Image (tube, helix red, strand yellow):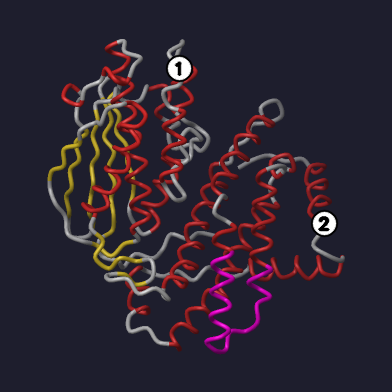
């Protein structure tokens, strides 16, 4: 996946051994523990399994859930720590080194937590999980900045392809947050929810929420709202709403920005106040369902994606926003404030302009057996298809 020289590996090894986590004996114990846990495979679950376990919750089930997370989190973290150690030294410097530190701290905190025997142990472990979730909140942003920095550093040394590595990092992160937050949220009683899972998640409702959120941001930035026409209806599905919210927010944001900026370009307007919702081509959304899947198609007339960059849109670090900014001659930055607004509006929001939003959306869709596909008609617009499993019987997409 990437080439490294033995000298780099040696410097990298020295760097990790110099981390200030204590004595040499402690470092040896830590390294042995990581290696031991990394030999294990993650234990996967389906949404329905998580729902069934969380129903009719009692103290014993809470303890069992905490024990599972206690055993499982170090396994999943160990694999990623090994991956980080295998990177070239210049990649690990900076933001990615901070990710490494967060993962090592989480690994040691969970691994060294005492055996969970009673409800008091479980409560204290839940507090630890909340802390670890908060501590890792900015990992995606750090990864995005670290990747960009690494690509810049590698430009004159070697070809560097980190997409597979980033895929694994993000897939693992989705899974770790899911099992940690699932346990934490078992303490919360919410109608229709078992932990973070909505047993009757409505794609229409998620779509409405994402549209309202994007529409407010669009109006704030451009002074206009892009109309959205929705056709069809689908059944509710067992799903994690914030996964779907992330996907839909990213896709609607992309479509709205493309439509508005194409309209501005065609009409030679640089003032958003001159735009009108009435003459703006609508974004069309179609909802359909089959025996095993629900599909959401989002179609816009935003000009599509140029053929020379179409193959790069799911690559990490690539952004059509940056390309548009490079191509613009004057007229100001139409996308920058939009990006900042979207990120402020969304918890763990799409990494607009950093080239993570679309590939991460695809990972969210694929995590429980779905998919995300894009069809571009250069010069006209883009169709994006979001496929979601409706059975709840697909194992989570954790990979080694």
Q: Specify whether residue 118 is painted magenta.
A: yes
Q: Where is residue 214 shown, x and y percent of the image? A: 32, 39
Picture quarter with the N terminus = top right
Q: Quadrant of residue 376?
A: top left
Q: Where is residue 28 shown, x and y percent of the image? A: 81, 67
Alpha carbon separation for disc pair 1 and 2 = 48 Å
> Is label 2 in a helix, a strand or a loop?
helix
Number of numbered callouts drawn? 2
Residue extending furthest toward the left: 232
Picture quarter with the C terminus = bottom right
Q: Specify whether residue 350 is painted magenta.
A: no
Query: Is residue 308 depicted above or below 342 in this figure?
Result: above
Q: Where is residue 58 shown, x and y percent of the image? A: 40, 87
The part of the chain drawn in magenta is 108-131
Where does label 1 land, which residue? Answer: 332
User: Would residue 75 be found to the left or right of residue 193 on screen?
Assistant: right
Where does label 2 land, which residue? Answer: 17
Q: Quadrant of residue 31?
A: bottom right
Viewer-proximal residue among 175 and 277: 277
Chief secondary structure of the magenta portion: helix
Say which residue appears at 38% left-offset and 48% top-offset: 246
Q: Earlier in the sequence, mark 1 or mark 2?
A: 2
User: Would residue 317 be found to the left or right of residue 370 on screen?
Assistant: right
User: Would residue 238 be found to the left or right of residue 154 on screen?
Assistant: left
Which is more foreground, mark 1 or mark 2?
A: 1
> Is label 1 in a helix, a strand or a loop?
loop
User: Would residue 241 be found to the left or right of residue 63 on screen?
Assistant: left
């Amino acid at each position: 996946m990437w080439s490294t020289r033995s000298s780099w590996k040696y410097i990298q090894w020295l760097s990790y051994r110099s981390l200030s986590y204590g004595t040499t004996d402690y470092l040896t114990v830590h390294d042995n523990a990581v290696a031991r846990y990394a030999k294990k495979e993650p234990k996967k679950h389906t949404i329905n399994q998580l729902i069934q376990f969380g129903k009719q919750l009692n103290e014993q089930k809470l303890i069992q859930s905490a024990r599972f997370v206690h055993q499982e989190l170090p396994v999943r973290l160990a694999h990623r720590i090994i991956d980080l150690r295998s990177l070239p030294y210049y990649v690990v410097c900076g933001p990615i080194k901070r990710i490494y530190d967060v993962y090592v701290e989480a690994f040691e905190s969970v691994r060294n937590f005492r055996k969970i025997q009673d409800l008091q142990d479980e409560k204290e472990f839940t507090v630890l999980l909340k802390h670890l979730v908060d501590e890792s909140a900015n990992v995606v942003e750090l990864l995005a900045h670290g990747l960009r920095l690494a690509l810049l550093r590698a430009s004159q040394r070697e070809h560097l392809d980190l997409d597979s590595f980033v895929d694994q990092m993000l897939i693992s992160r989705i899974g770790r947050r899911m099992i940690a937050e699932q346990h934490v949220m078992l303490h919360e009683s919410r109608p229709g929810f078992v932990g973070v899972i909505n047993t009757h998640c409505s794609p229409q409702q998620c779509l409405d929420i994402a549209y309202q959120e994007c529409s407010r941001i669009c109006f704030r930035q451009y002074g206009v709202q892009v109309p959205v026409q929705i056709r069809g209806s689908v059944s509710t599905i067992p799903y994690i709403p914030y996964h779907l919210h992330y996907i839909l927010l990213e896709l609607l944001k992309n479509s709205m920005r493309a439509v508005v900026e194409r309209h501005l370009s065609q009409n030679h307007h640089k003032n958003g106040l001159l735009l009108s919702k009435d003459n703006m081509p609508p974004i069309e959304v179609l909802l359909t369902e089959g025996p095993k899947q629900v599909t959401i198609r989002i179609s816009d007339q935003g000009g599509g994606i140029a053929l020379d960059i179409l193959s790069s849109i799911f690559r990490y670090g690539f952004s059509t926003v940056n390309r548009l900014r490079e191509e613009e001659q004057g007229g100001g930055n139409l996308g920058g404030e939009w990006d900042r607004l979207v990120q402020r509006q969304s918890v763990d929001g799409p990494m607009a302009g950093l080239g993570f939003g679309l590939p991460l959306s695809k990972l969210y869709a694929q995590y429980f057996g779905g998919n995300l596909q894009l069809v571009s008609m250069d010069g006209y617009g883009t169709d994006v298809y979001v496929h979601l499993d409706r059975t709840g019987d697909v194992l989570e997409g954790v990979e080694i």
